[in-house]
Amino acid sequence: MNRHIALLPACIWLASANLGGVQATELVYAPVNPSFGGNPLNGTWLLNNAQAQNDKKDPDALSRSSFPRPSALDRFSDQLQSRLLSQFLSEVGNGNTGSLTTDDFIVEIVDDSGSLSIQITDRLTGEISEIQVNGLNLNN
């Protein structure tokens, strides 16, 4: 035991000699997350990292397969309806008026000597929208 006591002052001297050259510096916190003041370029990386780790699925989210795909007949009907409505509206420029009825709505166009009135009726709800344009000379 005497030998350990004799080494104690030497160890203390050695430790104090080594600590004399050590300097302390200030610790500076630099946030990574841009929400807390970090570099904005880290945002995409953090989001992608979080999404890659997320294995939870939203039970209320609709998948693409849950939407019914329209049949060829539905697509053809929609295209024909769009074409007829386009032709009907272009005929208004020639001074022609009239109405067009489809499964979804009724369009009535009336030219009252320079005042054009377009009335659109939703057949499902009965809601009516009216567009009036004044100052037109459709006969020219």
Image (tube, grey):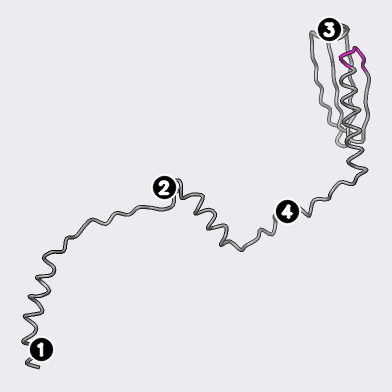
Circles 2 and 4, Cβ within 8 Å, touching? The answer is: no
Whether residue 93 appears in magenta in the rendering, the answer is yes
Q: CA distance from mark 1 to mark 3?
A: 116 Å
- Residue type beneath disc 4: Leu
Marked residue nearer the N-terminal end (1 or 2): 1
How far apart, in angstroms, are the residues tagged by discs 4 and 3?
Answer: 50 Å
From which residue to which does the magenta span run?
92-97
- Frontmost residue, 20 versus 65: 20
Q: Which residue is mark 3?
A: 137
Mark earlier in primary sequence (1, 4)? 1
Between label 1 and label 4, give the one nearer the viewer. 1
User: Badge 1, how many Cα within 10 Å: few under 14, some, many 20+?
Assistant: few
Q: Quadrant of the N terminus?
A: bottom left
- Residue 94 percent across, percent down from the top left: 90, 13
Mark 1 — residue?
4
Q: Earlier in the sequence, mark 2 or mark 4?
A: 2
Under mark 1, the amino acid is His
Residue 62 badge:
4
Tag 3 or tag 2, which sits nearer the N-term?
A: 2
Residues at marks 1 and 4, CA–CA distance in whole angstroms: 76 Å
Direction bottom: furthest residue: 1
